Image (cartoon, helix red, strand yellow):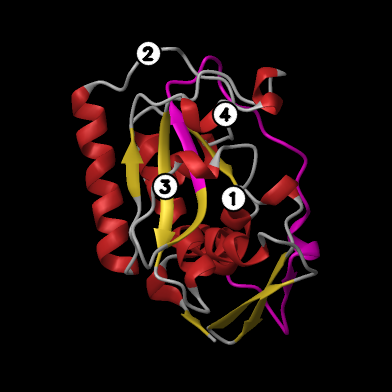
Amino acid sequence: MGINECIHSRHSVRAYEDKPLDEDTAAKLEESIAAANRDGSLSCRLIRNDKSIFDTILNHYGWFKNVSNVIVLAGKDASDLEERIGYYGERIVLAATALGLGTCWVAGTYKKKNVPVAAGEKLVCVIAAGYPMKPGKAHKSKSFSQVSVTDGPVPEWFKNGVEAALLAPTAVNQQKFCFVLEGNAVEAKIKGTGSAVKIDLGIVKEHFEEGAGRENFHWK
């Protein structure tokens, strides 16, 4: 499955089959996590076969089901940590999608005390992962014009980048972002406030790059 196909087929999954990851899939997922850690200076890791992290009252009422594989997203505290977590965490998500796994970004509704983090590291959020009980589904999305600003003719690569960003997961599907085009320079902006907007910004920037092609523009 190619990266653009992964972007289009990825949807958040909350219910998983009650079975462990096969060893080959787990090994490939670990490789993508190691690459994210190396490229993003992060300390992410995979916890397998542990249901205690999502054993909460809310999840007993159906928010999540059979979550036993969790990707821990952490790193040394810094002003840009949340954006890096979003960017490189979404790379992991797309890699997981290519492996046939379902995923879901989760900032709450899990037991943080059950997620061990090394001294000096900050836990930002987690990603649930596993074999989907049923495919996720698309949600209502904003339009191209609602999340972009241009000053002239719009190149095809910019359209493709914004369309890919609109397919990215964001907190409560609010899509609080905007891409501003000036020549071949692009600025990604946060619109509004919220606890996860910096994470979302990193996620949508990764999607934009994949859709637009990194060779076609530079970030402002």
Q: Which residue is mark 2?
A: 19
Q: Which residue is mark 3?
A: 72
In 3D space, how far apart are the residues under numbered discs 4 and 2 (Cα atoms)? 15 Å
What segment is highlighted magenta in the picture? 126-155
- Which dot, 2 or 3, sits closer to the camera? 3
Q: Which comes sooner in the sequence, label 2 or label 1?
A: 2
Amino acid type at mark 4: Val
Q: Residue at x 28, y 39 (%)?
A: 29
Q: Which comes sooner in the sequence, label 2 or label 3?
A: 2
| Horizontal and vertical percent position of residue 114 | 46, 39
Tell me if residue 145 is in the magenta stretch: yes
Q: Which residue is mark 4?
A: 13
Amino acid type at mark 1: Ala
**Numbered disc total:** 4
Amino acid type at mark 2: Lys
| Horizontal and vertical percent position of residue 193 | 78, 68
